[in-house]
Amino acid sequence: MLALLSTRKLLALSTLAAAPMVASAALADPESWEVMCAFSNAGPGDTTICNEGKVLPVSAPNLGQKMLLRIGAPTSHCSDITYEITRFPDFAPLAVTRRLAPGEDQIIELAEGWAEEGDYISITGIGHIGGCNVGQMHSWGALTEVFPLDAAPVASSSPTLLVSTSLSVECGASLPFEVTPGVASMACDRLIPIDFVSPGRGHELDLTLTAPATHCSTVTYMINDPATGSTLAMSPRLSAGESFRLSLGANWDAGPQVIDIGAVGYVDGCNVGEIQSWGVDAQLLQLN
């Protein structure tokens, strides 16, 4: 996987496409940007922190409106990154994203108390050593979108597309995992998180998973709840191009949520006993 730039300028930030949001309109189009680091400092663990950050305005449609931020790591990054978000100028902490690989994004709450104008957030880039990051950050970037969380989403008589995305991941290791007794299969040690904004309890959500046409062996997808560690659902064995639609239920609290998708590979096609990488095309629908 590629991630944080270490020796070259950040390129093609606009290639990261933000997935569609819930019905509430964004306050501005998604913005891609980059930050150049004059120097970087060693952070906790194997991390580096750029000396330069990014300040973005937060304009709430109503005084006190709760706001959300979608932030994504550009596909041109060549090592992983974590984003730290604070209020500006007092730098009161708001949130820290999980570790994001290139092309991954996350939706986070920015709490309440935002005015129509004059409020800002500051974003700090924390690079993880690996890939092209050998201990110094030269640049980093993000794609961001700030939008309001509606307190009472309007029910729709037709399905509403919440997320549409295509993601892939490289595995660090294959772990023995039996789906069907007597059939050789193994699980990738890395999951793919998918962030979405839930419209609230009582709204039925459906997820369609498609095995990319580039797959050269069959795969089973598992959907996990990272908050509880439980498995929510599992697809059947899918060949390249095949899809499966499953229900995520209607018990999700309103606001930012995340599910993890895992993959189990089978010994067939190009898989001779190890799953090295996998991908998925995912569409999340609100049915009512």
Image: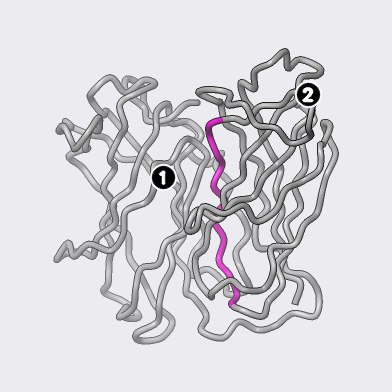
Residue 144, quarter of picture: bottom left
Residue at 18 percent of width and 65 percent of height:
92
274 to the left or right of 104: right
What residue do we see at 27% from left, 66% from top? 120
Q: Residue at x 67, y 73 (%)?
A: 250
Amino acid of disc 2: Ser
Where 268 sits versus 108, above or below? above
Residue 214 lies in quadrant = top right
Local secondary structure at mark 2? loop
Tell me the SS state at disc 1: strand
Q: Residues within 10 Å of mark 2 (few under 14, many from 20)?
A: some
Quarter of the figure that contains the C terminus: bottom right
Judging by the rendered image, the residue that carries numbered circle 2 is: 217
Structure colour scheme = one colour
Q: Earlier in the sequence, mark 1 or mark 2?
A: 1
Q: Amino acid at mark 1?
A: Ala
| CB under 8 Å between discs 1 and 2 | no
For disc 1, the marked residue is 142
Q: Is residue 236 left or right of residue 155?
A: right
Give x and y (percent) for residue 244: 82, 48
Q: Which mark is residue 28?
A: none
Viewer-side residue, 267 vs 157? 267
Residue count near mark 1 (Cα–Cα under 10 Å), binned few <14, some 14–19, many ≥20: many
Q: Write down the region rendered in magenta.
A: 189-200
Closer to the camera: disc 1 or disc 2? 2
Left or right of 69, for residue 201: right
